[in-house]
Amino acid sequence: MTVTVFENPWLKGLFSDPEMAAILSPQRTVDHMLFFEASWSRACGKVGLFNAADAEAAARAITDAQIDLDDLAKGTAQDGLPIPRLVKQLKLLAPAAAVHQGATSQDVMDTAMVLSMREASNLIAARLDLICTLLNDLENRFGEMPLMGRTRMQAATMITVRDRLHTWRSPLVGHISRLAEIRPRVERVQIGGASGDRNSLGDRQDKVVADVAAMLGLAPTAKAWHAMREGMAEYAGWLSLVSGSLGKFGQDLVLMAQQGIDEVVLSGTGGSSAMSHKRNPVAAELLLTLARFNAVQVGAMHHAMIHEQERSGAAWSLEWMVLPQMLMATGRATATTVEICNGIERMGNPSSA
């Protein structure tokens, strides 16, 4: 077996999201690192910190660089992170004095992560919009059908399919709005230098930060957020809210699909190796699993907020372990929900109509 279900040769058939995996791929992450380094060289050349011609030559060489990922792995084993070895490779390809000077490893890695998060947010938001549209379509098809309302899993009073659809859809609309509020607090460039004070940039620091941010399409910041991780924790919480709401959708579908209740008919259900009559609601169950997985990871992201002084190796590297998996889980949950909505053949209780 592999360490993660998202990459296991057979389990990835259930857990993997190819679009999210492409966003989080090693090569895409390296591309983001190079984007930062090229922007850094150009910004520093523009204000005279680097020779302007060397800076432009460096930026072009960095943009076209082919990075040896195996060498990065060896460097990470030695240094605890890949950037020293990345910079060493880049300095063999470009004017060394115009590469990375004044930046630090965390600037590169945090900014690269933010660029990945921005792409992931675009993907998740688009899928949430689609899910809301599909739920609206289900309401148009089945909204007037009667459904037994249940409280504490016991029959209560009759409702309609529309009532339950509203409970599924309304939180998703809120999550889309919540993401728009969070993004300015997350999609920010990271620039601090060695100890987070930007002193190596002197009186040109504001200009460099603004220029790098503009080139990357991120917001500038008044100070580095090396040891201030509340934005990352807030974003992780949002991911868990999304997967949690979709988990509620999955939980309801599992109960509605029970034999003897039959309040929903799902296409594409799974079979059993021992009982040929079964139609297991595998996709709906997956939403539950992913929601519970993300809920557990939120605590780890809150632990990762606790940095010592100006930078922590231990807390920071915990983020690397947790956040990408939360993105994968949320991506898979949204993709699965789209599949489920497209496969619902009937909702409601026709016998009560």
Image (tube, helix red, strand yellow):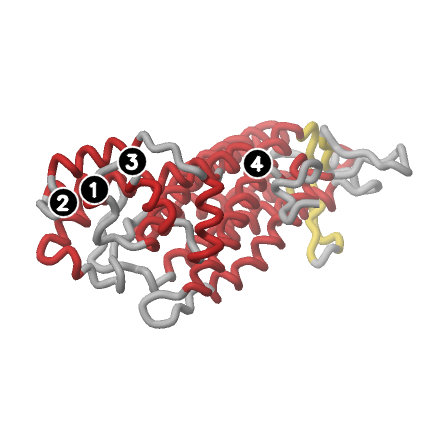
Callout 2 amino acid: Phe
User: Alpha-carbon neighbours of circle 2 within 10 Å: few (<14), some, or many (≥20)?
Assistant: some
Callout 4 amino acid: Asp
Q: Position of residue 7 (x, y in %)?
A: 62, 40
Q: Residue at x 21, y 53 (%)?
A: 102
Q: Cβ–Cβ below 8 Å for labels 4 and 2?
A: no
Q: Residue at x 91, y 38 (%)?
A: 274
User: Alpha-carbon neighbours of circle 3 within 10 Å: few (<14), some, or many (≥20)?
Assistant: some
Which residue is identified by label 2? Answer: 50
Q: Is residue 163 left or right of residue 118?
A: right
Which residue is identified by label 1? Answer: 41
Quarter of the picture holding the N terminus: top right
Q: Is residue 40 visible?
A: no
Q: Position of residue 119 (x, y in %)?
A: 40, 38
Of mark 3 and mark 2, the one earlier in the sequence is: 2
Q: Cβ–Cβ below 8 Å for labels 2 and 1?
A: yes
Q: Is residue 156 left or right of residue 65?
A: right
Q: CA distance from mark 4 to mark 1?
A: 35 Å
Which residue is identified by label 3? Answer: 93
Q: Cβ–Cβ below 8 Å for labels 3 and 2?
A: no
Q: State whether residue 62 is above or below residue 285.
A: above
Q: Position of residue 4 (x, y in %)?
A: 63, 47
Assign a secondary structure to mark 2: loop
Mark 4 or mark 1, whichever is nearer to me? 1
User: Alpha-carbon neighbours of circle 4 within 10 Å: few (<14), some, or many (≥20)?
Assistant: many
Which residue is identified by label 4? Answer: 17
Of mark 4 and mark 1, the one earlier in the sequence is: 4
Q: Nearer the viewer, residue 297 or 132?
A: 297
Q: Nearer the viewer, residue 246 or 161?
A: 246
Assign a secondary structure to mark 4: loop
